Amino acid sequence: MNSERAISDKFWLFLKGLIMGAANKVPGVSGGLVAFVGGFYEEFIYSLQKINRKAFKLLISGRFKTFGRYVNGSFLGLLATGMGVSYFSVSKILDFLLLEYELHVWSAFFGMIIGSIYYIVKDFGEWSKRYVGYLVLGIIAGIAISFLEPARENDNLIFVFICGIIGVSGMTLPGLSGSFILILLGNYVLLLVDSVNALFDTLSEIITGDFSFTRNIERVQLLKVLVVFSAGSITGLVSLSHLLGYVLKKYKKATYAVIIGFITGSLGVVWPWKNKVHSINSLGEIKLDANGREIIMGFNRYFPSELSTNTLLAIFFIILGAITVLSLNWFHTYKKKNNV
């Protein structure tokens, strides 16, 4: 029975990693929020905090089992595996859905975030004036980030490393979308689409014994970009986890108040009804970047003016998204209560 439960727990952890990976790739959605709602946020942060000098000493000395236990390796390994698989599977499906059913996908995410806010708020406890102040600060910060304009794409490796450090924030800070931050930095497509696709194509070719990619200058550059971005992400993940671990220990409730505010303020990023604002040249044509993609300067958000079929479907998906999150919360509570 215990063996079956252990397998079930591992499967659910892998599944949460899949969802985190998909969430990290969608602008406006935070992998950290998935961890928060999934009930493993603090364990995630404290496990990452264990990746320190002592952990490296254990690793270098070959004490792999001790290293694994020290850093909660089983937990982090399953999450990382789920996220890795997600980047080549679930996130690909999401890319397709966002292309074909954009309004409905954003509506579902909007509903899921509303459900998440309710989930976090209901267990917060008493709200003092001080915590309300932290909440308001979080809301203001979330709104401010939502309305910033994107920069241009930049594949300079130092800048890519910085993007990795900043972009990984979505995994550690609920409500702060790493993907949206990368859009603001101008490197979302380069780092989460082009470079990931380049790795996928390269691995496919290596499996078939084709190493011609080594002569493809553009492919090699994209692979370099991905390696540097990954290094920056690992650096940021470990650094932020140490900072957050300290803050959560000392100011847990205040931190949660800011997080709730931030999630609420950033709802504008995933608002379903919006039009892209393109950069226009002197001839009135849409400007393209070096890779021939349309340059997006921001979004015009609006309220639907009529109850069309599309609008009703969007409202349905908002409700469905909220119910999905609350159902997962109910299931998690049921499992805990009945020791399943």
Image (cartoon, rainbow, N blue to C red):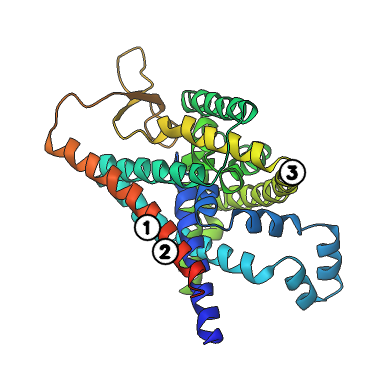
Looking at the image, the residue that sits furthest to the left is 308
Q: Secondary structure at mark 2?
A: helix
295 is higher (above) or lower (below) than 291: above
Dividing the picture into quadrants, the one containing residue 331 is: bottom left
In primary-sequence order, the first of circles 3 and 1 is: 3
Q: Is residue 53 left or right of residue 154?
A: right
Q: Position of residue 190 (x, y in %)?
A: 50, 42
Q: Is residue 292 left or right of residue 184?
A: left
Dividing the picture into quadrants, the one containing residue 118 is: top left
Q: Is residue 181 visible?
A: no
| Alpha carbons under labels 2 and 3: distance apart | 31 Å
Q: Position of residue 313 (x, y in %)?
A: 19, 42
Give the residue type that dot 1 points to. Ser
Nearer-the-camera pick, 162 or 10: 10
The residue identified by callout 1 is 327
Give the residue type that dot 3 points to. Leu
255 is higher (above) or lower (below) than 141: below
Nearer-the-camera pick, 334 or 274: 334
Residue 243: mark = 3
Q: Residues within 10 Å of mark 2 (few under 14, many from 20)?
A: few
Residue 331: mark = 2
Query: Circles 2 and 1: CB distance less than 8 Å?
Result: yes
In primary-sequence order, the first of circles 2 and 3 is: 3
Which residue lies at the image location 22% right of the left edge and 44% below the top edge?
316
Closer to the observer: label 2 or label 3? 2
Which residue lies at the image location 54% right of the left edge and 23% below the top edge?
140
Q: Is residue 97 visible?
A: yes
